Amino acid sequence: MFGPASATVLLSQAKMRQRSEMTATGRLRQPGYVLTTFAVFIFAILSACSMATTGNAANDAAAVDALNAWWKDATYSKPPVKAGTVTPTQTITSPNGRVQTIPRHVQTRQEAEAEVEDARWAQHLRAIVRGFSVGDGTVTVLTSLTGAEAPHPSSDLPGAVLESDAQELCHILGGFVWANDNRRFGLENILIKGADGQVLSHRIGIRGKVR
């Protein structure tokens, strides 16, 4: 027989076991706990997405900056030298201290004409390109082209292959997209867009052809 004191102790122990079971197995069944856990889960996902988006935006911005600098160098042309211009003998010292002598040179007519043509083409390229954008691994070149421009002999392809200005740009941009120094940007594709936003040429992947 248990006295009143023993009954009180047993009741207290039973309540403690009940609380322990609620803590161990019943917490997930409580609506408040479920909502809190769900909210934390969603917050973690959104935070990860936000960090990824920020990282991609920073990468794309860095790619555009590098592309603008590369384009400036790629389309630079020194002022043409007139035929008959005499360049005296010069000496150049390399970084390792080696001295190289460049002999006196008289500019020929053919050389002068080639330099004039190079300068004209570089100016044409600078004129038709309005800017660049980068996103999702794709470089987009924004141009003033209409798509009605007459094709011309390619400067990159052998023979008498004709291509449009848009295709020429697509070939040229490959020199940036797949350069070893630029692989860190994760670029894979090239789009050339016209003045109205239409795609005039594209290349998908390094193995893709210019279309």
Image (cartoon, rainbow, N blue to C red):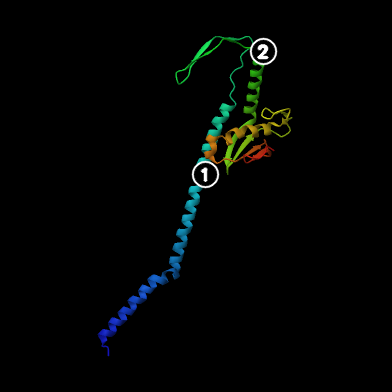
Query: Crowding near pointer 1: few (<14 within 10 Å), some, many (20+)?
Result: some
Query: Crowding near pointer 2: few (<14 within 10 Å), some, many (20+)?
Result: some
Q: Earlier in the sequence, mark 1 or mark 2?
A: 1
> In the picture provided, is 49 more to the left or to the right than 155?
left
Place of residue 6 in the rendered image (x, y in percent of width and height, measured from the top left): 26, 84
Q: CA distance from mark 1 to mark 2?
A: 51 Å
- Amino acid type of the residue that numbered disc 1 sits on in the rendered structure: Asn
Q: Which residue is mark 1?
A: 56
Q: Which residue is mark 2?
A: 109
Asked if 104 appears above or below 129 in the picture, the reply is above
> In the picture provided, is 41 more to the left or to the right than 171?
left
- Amino acid type of the residue that numbered disc 2 sits on in the rendered structure: Arg
Place of residue 72 in the rendered image (x, y in percent of width and height, measured from the top left): 56, 28
Residue at point 65%, 26% (across, down): 124
Helix, strand or loop status at disc 2? helix
Query: Toward which corner of the image does residue 80 lie, by quadrant?
Result: top right
Query: Toward which corner of the image does residue 139 lie, by quadrant?
Result: top right
Residue at point 50%, 51% (across, down): 49
Place of residue 60 in the rendered image (x, y in percent of width and height, measured from the top left): 54, 40
Place of residue 136 in the rendered image (x, y in percent of width and height, measured from the top left): 58, 44
Q: Residue furthest bottom?
A: 1
Q: Circles 1 and 2: CB distance less than 8 Å?
A: no
Residue at point 64%, 28% (across, down): 125
Residue at point 49%, 53% (across, down): 46
Quarter of the picture holding the C terminus = top right
Asked if 190 appears above or below 112 in the picture, the reply is below
Quarter of the picture holding the N terminus = bottom left
Q: Closer to the observer: label 1 or label 2?
A: 2
